[in-house]
Amino acid sequence: MVSSPQYIPYIADSDRNTFYFLSFGTDGKIRASSGSSEVNVAGYELDKWYDFKLILDFKAQNYDLYLDGVLVKENLPF
């Protein structure tokens, strides 16, 4: 596990408000941001590659998350 949470990717709006979409927690969980909270996505292993895909809808301000080609969360707000 990581020694402190790691957040990826960061995206900022025109007012410089920063959003992150994924975090790797110290408890071995991958989480996705969902508005002001987080939802569990999956567990992770150190030294293993993961393929993430984010489909962002800036107009609706939500996104879908794919992990290794599988849709795992949809319509998460940001």
Image (cartoon, rainbow, N blue to C red):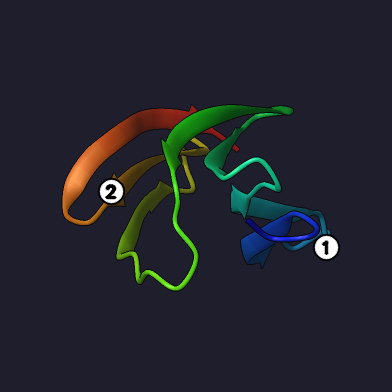
Label 2: how many residues lie within 10 Å, few (<14), some (14-19) or many (20+)? some
In this rendering, the answer to whether 50 lies above or below 39 is below
* Mark positioned earlier in the residue sequence (2 or 1): 1
Q: The residue under label 1 is which amino acid type?
A: Arg
Q: Secondary structure at mark 1?
A: loop
Coordinates of residue 47 in the picture (x, y in percent): 45, 73
| Quadrant assignment for the N terminus | bottom right
Coordinates of residue 64 in the picture (x, y in percent): 34, 41
Q: Which mark is residue 66?
A: 2
Instruction: Please name whichever residue, 65 or 1, is drawn nearer the observer in this view of the structure.
Output: 1
Q: Which mark is residue 2?
A: none
* Residue occupying image coordinates x 81% and y 54%: 17
Q: Secondary structure at mark 2?
A: strand
| Quadrant assignment for the C terminus | top right
* Residue occupying image coordinates x 70% and y 52%: 19
Coordinates of residue 42 in the picture (x, y in percent): 41, 38
* Residue occupying image coordinates x 61% and y 52%: 24
Number of marks: 2
Which residue does the numbered mark 1 point to in the structure image? 16
